[in-house]
Amino acid sequence: MKKLAEGIISERKAQALTELAIFGSILLFCLAMLIQFGLQANYQQEAQMEAFRKAQQMAFNRDGPNSAVSLTLFKNKAIPDPRDQFGFAERVAIPGSGSVTWDTDQSAAYIKKFDDAPQEEDLPAMYFQMEGVSRGDVVLDQDNYPTGERIQDVAKAEVVSGDKNTFGFYTAKFEKRPCPPKIIVVFEDREHSQNTEYIKEPVFKDQIMVSRLEGGFEGIEAETGSTLLMYPYFRRSGSLIKQRITDADLDGDGRLEYILAADKNKNLFYIRYHGASPADAYDKVGNIQVDTAYAQIDPGDREVTEYGLGRELTPQDRQGLLRDFEKSIQHSGSKIVRTENAGSVESETTLNAKQTTYYKFRLNDGRTVSIPVELSTDPGTALYKWAN
């Protein structure tokens, strides 16, 4: 009986230890998840606030009438992982973004008078800043091999503040041209629909009138000088509503241009966000093209809805920062040595590792380039040190 009782007690102890080990593992896993989510939320808020402040500083340093900046920031933060036996804490890219317009009139045009030449720094652009990367660093191809170029060679947007860690891609260019005999205008249907629906309509040049941007009585103010900023508009047949022309296909290529202003002679100042024609995919409008779907229309369609201004984007159309970035972690001689001496167990960890994150950008010429961020435990080789 005594041996039987001792056996039952031993079995219960083993069961208790097993349950404790399982419960402890679950408890540690839940604690690790709470720590990871908490750190990510805290780092995300920090990156968001820093991105806004830096975008605000960049917008403040500009001199143009429309000082607007869009900035995306990436911070490399250590997130502990209890499953990692080496305990070096993998670095995770934490993004933050900010868009700031430093102007008393957020609808201001890029020029004050029609004859003014817009400044290159005011061209629409998307800016990026990645912790551990400067504009002079090398660029890799889509297979992560050196191209012989640097970031500033492919990301050509001017950085007025002179910040070496910020780089940008132009997304459009400005143009001026006389209004052609006929244009295709796309405007919101405010008469027949309570939803956001659009109408596409051909408009002839003699149907177009101009008026000052500040308002006024049709074409009267236009006689005071050709340098005034006007806006073009027309009235549909049988309607008294003035339809301002902002989105129009000026050259018949099936893509929309954004009209900023006009003068009394019906010359148009506009932004071109796309190539010269659908067949010319490599027109150097900007380093990247961000609104392919919106910029394309089908001249044969009679109805244009909110999502019907162009074909749906595919992964092959997407330009700029791609979502499918790569990350690799390499160990070279990392090891854990455990020694047992006189009943005591000691361990010594040797860590020699490198983590590289490759951010992919697709340019307007069809190329995909890669910008690496390297983090290493070796203080002499890394762009960005692991211990920081």
Image (cartoon, rainbow, N blue to C red):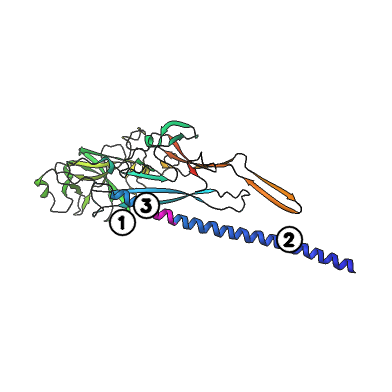
Residue 299 visible within the image: no
What secondary structure characterizes most of the magenta part? helix
Image position, residue 376 (x, y; %): 53, 42
Say which residue appears at 69% left-offset and 60% top-offset. 22
Residue type marked 1: Ser
Magenta span of residues? 45-51
Q: Residues within 10 Å of mark 2 (few under 14, many from 20)?
A: few
Task: Indicate which disc, 3 or 1, sits on the residue closer to the N terminus.
Answer: 3
Number of marks in the rendered image: 3
Residue under circle 2?
A: 18
Residue under circle 1?
A: 193
Residue under circle 3?
A: 98
Question: Label 1's element?
Answer: loop
Q: Is residue 360 above or below residue 26?
A: above
The foreground one among 289 and 92 is: 92
Mark sitting on residue 73: none
